[in-house]
Amino acid sequence: MSFLANLLEHYHMTTEDLRVRSTPGSFADLRLPDETKDFQAVVRRLSLAVERKEKVVLYGDYDVDGLTSTAILKIALSALGLDVGFFIPSRYVEGYGLHESRVKQFHEKGYSLIVLVDNGIRCHESIALARSLGMEVLVVDHHLCDSTLPPCSFVFHHRLSGFLDYDCSAASLCYFVARSLLGKDDEYLAFLAGLAVFSDCMPLVGNNLVFAKLALLFQNRIHFPNVSFLLPEKASYEDLSFQLIPTLNAVGRMMQDSMSSNKACWFLIRYQDKVYAHALSQWMTEINQKRKSIVKSLLPVEGRTLETEGGTVVLVDAPSGLAGLYANRLLREKGHPVAVLSHAENQEGTLVGSIRATEGFHLMDFLSSQKDRLLAFGGHDLACGVTIKEKDYFQFATNFLSYLEKARLEKKEEHKKDNLPLTLEDLNEENYHTLEMFEPFGSSFPAPAFELTCSTEDIKEGKNYFFVTDEKKLSKAIFFQPFSAVHHAGAELSIFTGSFHCNDFHGRKSYVLMADQYREE
């Protein structure tokens, strides 16, 4: 079977399905919420604010979805002549959601309308406070909501409004609001909405897939001045996911003051100011390098790791903002769901955690079943956050691992991931371009895992890695561990499992199976 045929069979796709998927994104492919009543009410209220020149403030979140959501509405409202303010909270100072101290500050500054983006759907008390002070509140959010809506008249939520029956980012909802206000589509705002698809691990279906395609298409066509400082000239989906998004996220994870994430948002807003963007890009890159160093050196607290075949729970001694990054690292290493918790800043006796899962698990169902034991939780099935009392750590870990084990056994066959076999000869330019036709990869459409089998006698060793290659050294499978640490005497076959990449070193391209697993037979 050919490389293409294997991929089509793996994804249960036809050649027509692939043609549709590989077609560049288009604004015409977006499903619009224009006939949705909740959406119409939100747009009318913001249009009225523009007409009246009201004093409006946007209140976002410190992750990429929050930053892009805020930037989208700030740019759109400013283009309409409204001098709108904005604020991005610190995860360490205000925490997630609308903080009551900021509500009082907004009131003192004379704001009449607070617009909550990427938060607000569960901020009942702070919204009630704002209304008691005479301010109106408008919410554009995508998070799981309570059984009761927040006490405000203007809420645009993808599910509650009946707009979509699948998850989407808050930035995409803000894009539609901005589009309606401006009366046109906008390439840069669509790029921001596309970034949030990857940062929030949204399923690559419907509008999410369109926005993801548009993000890469517009960056490579237009080369937006700000993000071009953080991306190669010809960017890939991997560059967006593993280079740009982590750099933007690093600010909110590493910096504990209330103004740093606001600077990151200004980086997105002032996208045409090259001098300003260059300075901020250098600042964010330095922060991200520090973040990488810390995450690489993180180790679990002794005696606080619980692990089964189906999952892992660890406690780390690190800033709570880094828990999610360490969770991502463990997820890649172990291949099963993980929960990473750390001590909450300024909240003695409290742990804050990030949970990451593979396809087929329903984290929000588990957390909903545990809500009486949780101080707070939110997110979606593949990535969510939780706050618990420190004394409940082992009980929470036990409940989580029990859920995972039950789910793993129930879903073992249904969600079994089949590795696609290939040879060194298959690692070539033609097949790499075939694989690119299936992009983007992500939630609900993960990149395929490939498996290459060779004779153990053909293994070559480097410093802290080993590999097998063809005679011209243009095709290679590589695993980054000392061979002595994994080799068993008498093993005849070496089996590499991982992802297919193209490396370009000074114009010389090679095609590599970057293995994250290795075994011998």
Image (cartoon, helix red, strand yellow):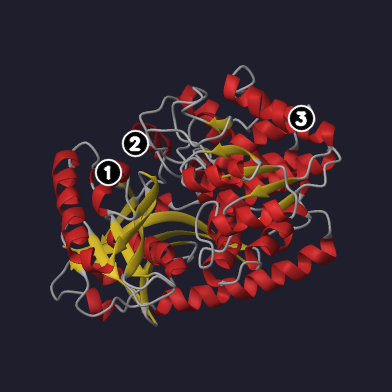
In which quarter of the view is residue 5 placed? top left
Residue 319: which numbered mark, if any? none
| Placement of the N terminus among the 4 image quadrants | top left
Residue at the far right in the pictured view: 81
> Element at badge 1?
loop
> Element at badge 2?
helix
Seen at 36% across and 37% down, the residue is 6
Task: Please identify, in this view, whether the residue under mark 3 or under mark 2 is nearer the observer.
Answer: 3
Residue 418: which numbered mark, if any? 1
- Give the mark, 2 or 1, whose residue is nearer the N terminus: 2
Label 3 – label 1 distance at C-alpha: 51 Å
The amino acid sitting under disc 3 is Ser
| Mark 2, residue position | 10
For disc 3, the neighbor class at 10 Å (few under 14, some 14 to 19, many from 20) is: some
For disc 1, the neighbor class at 10 Å (few under 14, some 14 to 19, many from 20) is: few
Q: Is residue 37 left or right of residue 218?
A: left
User: Where residue 144 sits: x, y (%)?
Assistant: 41, 39
Seen in the picture, residue 254 relative to 207 is either above or below; the reply is below
The amino acid sitting under disc 1 is Asp
In-front residue for pair 258/242 = 258
Residue 47: which numbered mark, if any? 3
